[in-house]
Image (tube, grey):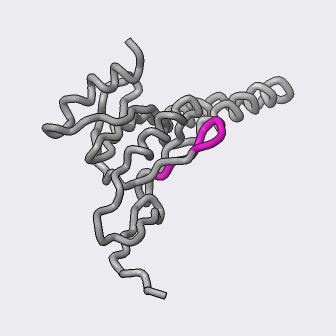
Amino acid sequence: MAFRDRMRRQAQPHLEPGETIQAVFGAVSGVHPGLIGLLLLLSVLLGMVTELRLGWLVLFAALWMRNVVIVATDRALLVFELSKWGRVDRVRRLARHIRLGPISGWWAKVSLDHDESVYVARRYRDDVAAADAAIALPPVGVTDVWPARGRARISLRRKPVA
């Protein structure tokens, strides 16, 4: 069974009645994933030249990382924080108006909330685009919506008539 299908099935009990899933993708929180490879390479190179061993630093950085699954529904963003063994530790509901993309690069930084960011792998670029495309249009009377630090600000002021 594919990753997305398994996460869709596991997300079903956490959905409200009538809520539908639009996109599912994985991410990593904590340390940038590229830092693990860089620290590992540095550890090997310094270990060959000197007696300095940095394996503990790589292990610490790897343990600091957390796997996250983001499920975009028609009403909210569900953030599933996974344990090291793949079990769901915590589920959070975020507002659906948060734009996640566009993303670029191998690991793109995506702001979920004003104080939390996750890194999304390149292979989930289409899923992030689908989640952003499915965001509902603002209600009638709202003139503009723009994201600010992961939150959307809504202006109800009317535009001046020229």
At 41% from the left and 41% from the top, the residue drawn is: 131
Residue 110 among magenta residues: yes
Q: Nearer the viewer, residue 54 or 75?
A: 75
Q: Nearer the viewer, residue 127 or 49?
A: 127
Residue 104 among magenta residues: yes
Which quadrant is the N terminus positioned in? top left
Task: Determine whether, in the image, residue 48 is placed left or right of residue 65.
Answer: right
| Residue at the extreme front of the image, as rendered | 162
Q: Nearer the viewer, residue 132 or 115?
A: 132
Percent x, y of residue 54: 69, 32
Q: Which contiguous range is marked in magenta?
A: 103-111
Q: Establish if 75 lies above or below 6.
A: below
Percent x, y of residue 30: 50, 43
Quarter-of-image position of residue 144 = bottom left
At 33% from the left and 20% from the top, the residue drawn is: 6
Quarter-of-image position of residue 86 = top left
At 20% from the left and 35% from the top, the residue drawn is: 14
Q: Establish if 15 lies above or below 112.
A: above
Percent x, y of residue 72: 35, 40
